Image (cartoon, grey):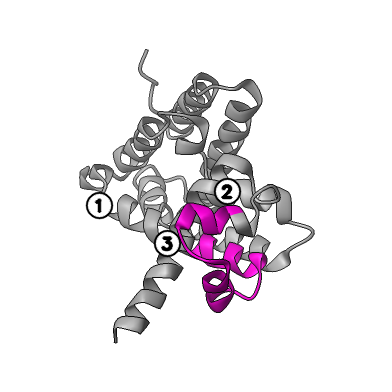
Amino acid sequence: MFRLAAKMDARSKLLDAALSVIRHKGYSASTVDELCSAAGVTKGAFFHHFKSKDELGVAAADHWSATTSAMFAEAAYHRHADPLDRVLAYIDFRKSLITGGLPDFTCLVGTMVQETYETAPDIRDACDRSISGHAATLVADIEAAMAERDMVATGLTAQSLALHTQAVLQGAFILAKAKGGADVAKSSVDHLRRYIELLFGRTPAA
């Protein structure tokens, strides 16, 4: 029993280390040795749990999804009565997370998919599951907001708008990396909020 618990602990340590190391260095530049060092485990422990770095990459994407899903599920934006207010509060919540250094607020799966979309399809698919799965959590609120405003016949779909929010957020993270700071990302999120307010016929706040 103790040996099994120790093995599971080593796997968890490697996954947590991957979230940090890959967001700091990128996927390609992160080596197995660095991941083991950050996790405090041996290389033998690494290959006991993962056949390759790419297999760890897939598991890290799934671990990221599970970790962040729990945080978003408990967030206060769900408590608003108006579905549009829930969507806007979600965007405000995303902006509030843009704090600290670049590796602290940028997205693991967004980072990995940019490097691996052509060379590691399993990682690409895991990143897509993460991003698209998160977008899907917004669909019900967007659909309700559209129905309240009789927007069903406009050609807009809740699914496409939910994915668009993620496109803006991931693009905001890229700009933050390019410019070396969080301000441009926050500005992009502000534009997203104004766009959605205008789309739903609400006058944006000054």
Q: Nearer the viewer, residue 93 or 80?
A: 93
Q: Are marks 2 and 3 in contact (CB under 8 Å)?
A: no
Q: Which mark is residue 116?
A: none
Horizontal and vertical percent position of residue 163: 55, 49
Residue at 55 percent of width and 78 percent of height? 48
User: In the image, is residue 23 above or below residue 54?
Assistant: above
Q: Can residue 59 be seen in this view?
A: yes
In which quadrant is the C terminus drawn? top left
The amino acid type found where label 2 is placed reads: Ile
Residue at 37 percent of width and 70 percent of height? 9
* Disc 2: which residue: 22
Q: Image quadrant of residue 67?
A: bottom left
For the view shown, which residue lies furthest in the right direction?
118
* Disc 3: which residue: 13
* Disc 1: which residue: 74
Q: Is residue 131 visible?
A: no
Q: Are marks 1 and 3 in contact (CB under 8 Å)?
A: no
Residue at 36 percent of width and 75 percent of height? 6
In which quadrant is the N terminus drawn? bottom left
Give the left or right position of residue 59, taking residue 32 as reference: left
For the residues labelled 2 and 3, the Cα–Cα distance comes to 14 Å
Give the left or right position of residue 64, taking residue 122 as reference: left
The amino acid type found where label 1 is placed reads: Glu
Circle 1 or circle 3, nearest the eye: 3
For the residues labelled 1 and 3, the Cα–Cα distance comes to 24 Å
Residue at 57 percent of width and 52 percent of height? 109
Horizontal and vertical percent position of residue 150: 41, 46
Q: Which of 201 and 15 is in front in this view?
A: 15
Report crowding for label 1: few under 14, some 14 to 19, many 20 or more residues within 10 A (C-alpha): few
N-terminal of the pair, mark 1 or mark 3, is 3
The amino acid type found where label 3 is placed reads: Lys
